Image: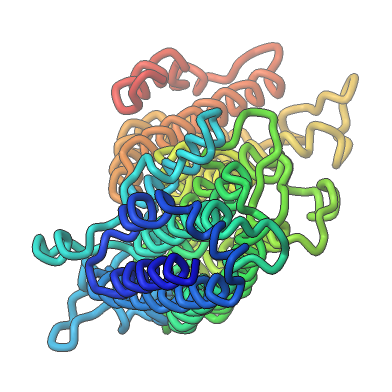
Amino acid sequence: RLRAISRTRTYFLDIMKELRRPKTHIRMIQTHALLKYGYLVDFLLVASPTIHGEIRDVYVESMSKTLHTLFRTYHKQLLTLDLRLATRVDLIAVEEAALRDAFSTKVNMRKRGDAFVLGDRAKVLDGAISAESGLDAAAAVVLIPPINAHVASMNGEKYPYEMIFRSIMSHLIDAATNEYVFARQFFKEYGQNDCFHAIFGKTLSLVLEQLENYLFNCHDAIAILLMIKLTHSYKRTVKARRIDKVLEPFLDRVTNLLWPRLKMVMDAHLRSIRSANAKKCGGGDIHPHLISRRYAEFTCSILLILNRGRKAGSSMDVGNDKLPADKIMPRSSSHGSSATSAPSHRGSAGDMLMNDLDVMLEEMNLLLKRLADEHSSNKKRVVFMINNLDQIITIFKERRVAGKELNRFSEILVHQRELFVEEELLQTFSKMIAFVQQTEAHMSGISVPRGARGVAAPADVVNPEVVESLVREFASNWKSGIEQINRNVLSYFSNFRNGMEILKQVLTQLLLYYTRFQDVIRKVWRGKPPSFCKDLVSTSVILSEIKKHALSI
């Protein structure tokens, strides 16, 4: 009996030494050298509990050191592959000087927006989304293999940090699953004092420390939000593998590191927008500003990540909190209602992010107005607003993001287009427009004219000589005026489709004003039209000329 105990002890201690060797296939040793002789562990538990405890302690110490070393080395290797996309100066409203090269006055195009564009980065969630779509959650993270550090280093590949995070967490959860199952099968421990925490305690603390150190200097909101989504998917995975009792507290701590950092980065973006002005960011051009592009790309990226994998009409989980479908996309179409009019989710991390996006929307609108005020004329201010609003809306549509932000900017754009229409027409046809507006107001009863049934006599309302000069002036200048409007619109608006829409709106309004001008003449001279009426241009002729300039009007 003593000889059996001694030989069994020697065998297991020799195997434990193998576990501490570098590049050892741990799973193979566990299966073929330990679990295969599990009955010997049962023998030691009965014959010599002291030796059994020694074997257990040696295994725990060996695996604890091995796992700690493996994950420390793996993280160090992966950090060399980190593609750091954002620094502390990569804010939505960045100073123009930060975009210039050290030895040039030109803006470096490579610094334009990598930290704000989602692109293919959402593919890191493919495993998580597959689980949400109905596949086995336990197999979700296997759909995308973790990074092979040696191969990636040899190929010179770089990855955003969320890919590194996913690789570490995937290996961690796989290793934790393996150890949890093995320890229960080998040592027959099923209570609160099993050896899992002793084995994995140092490794989990190491991963948390590594993440905290990285987040301290992380300014990439997209990466942080992707890691939050990944963490939540891992919660579903560990629950499906029935190891949530030991790993969910760890994942909660990961989430508690990520959300505050995301809040800090969002606050930095908000401060940059609030404090931005034309002197810092450069606002002398009427064409779309870099800030509006960055804002649109950033907001679309956040909303696309939140919406990723959400089933229509269902609630979506974000971090530890559930956001209802109406809090993501499509969001409320009304911009006039306050944030409290939506279902209350105060205190939730997801609600915090939504509120930040709402505040950012209004601050962005105020910033565009501040930059527009730097222009000398009201017309240029309106053109600047239209170009930037159109750029934001175009990006939202290209990314297929619909909701509150898109509706809000669309409404502002409609108003700005109306202002431009009036400004553009007043430049060429100001006399006729002023005459129409004043005469219509006079005839409607603001100044009650004398005459039968509220209709004024010609001399009481208008001066025939003024009307005649307006008729002849329009007849001689309307074609050149339309051509000038066409040239202005094409030069003002960089987006051709937007320019065509505005051109149609301007020319349609011009035709409407001229129709109203003719109606005024007919109302004033009901009985006998004056001789200059023969110089009135037919609306059909004007419409035919308009069609030459505006496509499909």
Q: Is residue 32 left or right of residue 214?
A: left
Res. 266 visible in picture: no
The residue at the point 64 percent across, 44 percent down is 328
Camera sees residue 313:
yes
Q: Position of residue 178 (x, y in %)?
A: 46, 54
Q: Position of residue 267 (x, y in %)?
A: 60, 75
| Vertical relation: 365 (above or below) 415 | below
Considering the image in quadrants, where does the C terminus appear?
Answer: top left
Q: How is the image coloured?
A: rainbow
Closer to the camera in the image, 222 or 464: 222
Q: Position of residue 17 (x, y in %)?
A: 32, 74
Image point (34%, 79%), residue name: 96
The correct choice, above or below, for 527 with respect to 255 in the image is above
Q: In this image, 47 relative to 452: left or right?
A: left
Q: Identify the residue at horizontal 44%, vertical 65% (top origin).
A: 4
Q: Nearer the viewer, residue 59 or 75?
A: 59
Q: Position of residue 466 (x, y in %)?
A: 57, 39
Identify whether 497 is placed above or below 59. above
Q: Viewer-proximal residue, 462 or 19? A: 19
Q: Residue at x 47, y 21 (%)?
A: 536
Q: Looking at this view, is 94 or 138 the one in front?
A: 138
Judged from this view, the residue extending furthest toward the bottom is 102
Q: Specify whether 99 is left or right of 262.
A: left
- Number of dots carrying numbers: 0
